[in-house]
Amino acid sequence: MKTKTLFRTALALTATLATIALASCSAGTSSGTSTAHGTTTVKMAMNSGPEADAMQKVATTYNAGQGKKDGTRVQLVVVHDVDLFTKEATEMRAKSTSIDVYFTTTYLIDQHKAYLTPLTGIDTANYYPNLVKSLSFNGKLYALPTDVSTYVLLYRKDLIDQLLSSASAKQTYASVAQSVLGHTMTPKPPAEWTWDDFIAMAAYFTKSVNPAAPTTYGSIMQTQNNPENIPYWDTLLWSFGGNWVNAGKAAMDSPAGHKAMDVLQTLANKKLIAPNSVNANYAQVQAAMSSGQTAFAMQWNAGFSQLNDPKQSPTTGGHMGIAPVPAGTQRKVHVQALAVGLNKYSQHQDAAMNWLKYLSTPAAMNQYAKSGGAPAMPAVLKENAAVDGAFTPMSQYIKLYGFTEPVPPNGAKYQLFTSLAQILSPAWAATSSGNQALQQADTAITQAWQK
Amino acid sequence: MTVAHGARYYGRTRWALLTPLLAFMALLVIIPVFYGVLTALQHNTLSNPVISFAGLQNFAKVLTDPLFWHSVLFTVQYTIIVVAIEMVLGILIALLFDHHFLGKRFLFSFIIMPLTIASSLIAVVSTLMFDDANGLVPALLRGIGLNISFLSTQRAGVAVMLTDILQWTPLVVLIVYAGLQSVPQDMYESAELDGAGYWQTVGHIVLPYIRPVLYVVVFLRTADAFRTFDNIFALTGGGPGTSTTNVSVYIYTAGFTNGNFGVGAAASVIVLILLFALIPFATRAVRL
């Protein structure tokens, strides 16, 4: 090839690369929303799963009805939750306009609120007041709650009933309790359980302790190093009267903290829970329950309908019971909301508000509940009690026992979740010292409260 | 064309030929690295949209974080172990394929199949293999009376390493096998005439002959293993606890989970500097 030809080839290659680069940059910064025939398309991010499936049905109804009057069309952008929050973090930091409505939660709102437009003209009277409060700052609502989530005790009703009705089983239970707790116990219905009952029941249903047990392990705990498992731990901590802080000072290393840690370490040390508890969150608990490996578990309310459906879970379908989480010195349960907020940099503020106002109506949430969501509106949950067996008990537990964690002065609640999960999770699995972990947790809390 | 004119002409041509590569490097390497260093020097968090100059604070935060050093230690252990095992296994398998046998082509295709599968998918398959509740491997071991939890704190590191070895040994096989094809047949014949056994021939002639190839594979696998993310993130998420947190998971957690891009970028820059140490090894190996 002649030198001139080489020179021209090189120039052509450079031009091609430059064109590709410019095209990539252009695609990356385009708004992604469009206006055609007088209709504005609003893009809303959602995490994949039952919530997105339910929301798609609400969006379809809106697009076919009210959306036409509003001149607004909603399009869901569905991504798996971990990837979704990563994608959203990138979009937010870049002040991108490609997503109009962001998906958020009560525990992420502190990170996200700087990129959200405060919502006005929303009737919040239908929602759980605590959740509205968790999503509000200085009296302004930054995101609309779509789903309410709390922990419940899901149990195999058939197996527990068998134990409660058999005299010989009760004798075995008493001796099993003696071996793991040092004192005998009488089996109680799950709604009355304390954490001691939980441990004794876990032992009774663990084959290595009770060879006649119908399950391999009594339970499975969500003790993975995952910031989203901090509410799980907090439910235990609060049940013993604990909190992150007491009078402005870190209070994890407290009698309540030690009792909560003892529960988890006893379960792990005595091998009364499935060994994959160290890597477990929602999905692993569902798998352990639906396969018949475990007899009961503390789980998100969303898990009940799937486990009790004979089509989805042949082993447990029709046999599941639901009860409040066990009590320590009191019964307490973490409550949180999934929510959606309006991107401050969206070029379709009015259209997105049209959609969010529609979404805040009981009619929209009614359809959402019927399609598999768990709206954060108590009246809608009550109206749809027949749709999901968890709705009525869940509403009751939230009302009686619900709590949300305090927000650190630096606003970085989720960062604190992450630090605490890193510090505490090895101790939950009894692979490191509980005392040391609680002390380190206090250091992390103190730092968060000092900033 | 005079000598001076020709030299000038070729000089221009050389630069013209280099331009696409330089433009490519500027777009994909220099600009992102510059932006990364800039971010590392900033208070740049998700919760506060106002960016301010942080000096070396983010670097100090990373360097004084025990979890960062734990992640570096795990990364180094992970890299040394997986690269060593992959090299040994890869060379042995490549030597095996350097012989003629029935079904060689089919078996070779089968062996290199993991290379065509996404790492995250391999990790999902590994989860299904190693999961204590429903995994195939623990179930088989339970069948012979061994109750081993592969995803426990003590063994999760082994599980992520096995996954890496399963996926990347085929790359070593592929490259080493290609290298073996360049060894002249007469070298084997001469060695045989001199009375050398098979392993003597391999150890003293074949492997030294393909040494540049081996160096390249070691370099590629070391750099890749050091930066592993998808495999660990999908299989253990860096846990249980922080037992399998490597530098990539640390950076991801700092940047995207904690929303602290400044700290994430500072950790990335530190890792980049650590990886720079590999470059002289690679350039010397390929005799640049």
Image (spheres, grey):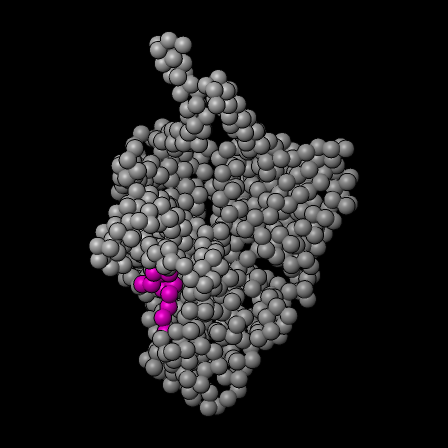
- Quadrant where the C terminus of chain B is found in the figure: top left
Please name the predominant secondary structure of the magenta segment in the image.
loop
x%, y% of residue A138?
A: 51, 39
x%, y% of residue A375?
A: 62, 55
Q: In the rendered structure, does residue B151 fall within the stretch colored magenta?
A: yes
Quadrant for residue B198, please give it. bottom left
Quadrant for residue A67, please give it. top right
x%, y% of residue B283?
A: 29, 36
Does residue B103 lie above or below B181 as drawn? below
Depth order, front residue of A65/A208: A208
Would residue B152 be seen by someone viewing this image from the given angle?
A: yes
Does residue B172 lie above or below B26 as drawn? below
Q: In the rendered structure, does residue B122 fall within the stretch colored magenta?
A: no
* Point 72% across, 38% down: residue: A72
B283 left or right of A2 in image: left
Depth order, front residue of B92/B77: B92
- Quadrant where the N terminus of chain B is found in the figure: top left
* Point 30% across, 56% down: residue: B88
Depth order, front residue of B130/B166: B166
x%, y% of residue B127?
A: 45, 61
Would residue B66 be seen by someone viewing this image from the given angle?
A: no
* Point 25% across, 53% down: residue: B191
Depth order, front residue of B226/A316: B226
Q: What stretch is highlighted in magenta?
A: B147-160
Does residue A199 lie above or below A213 as drawn? above
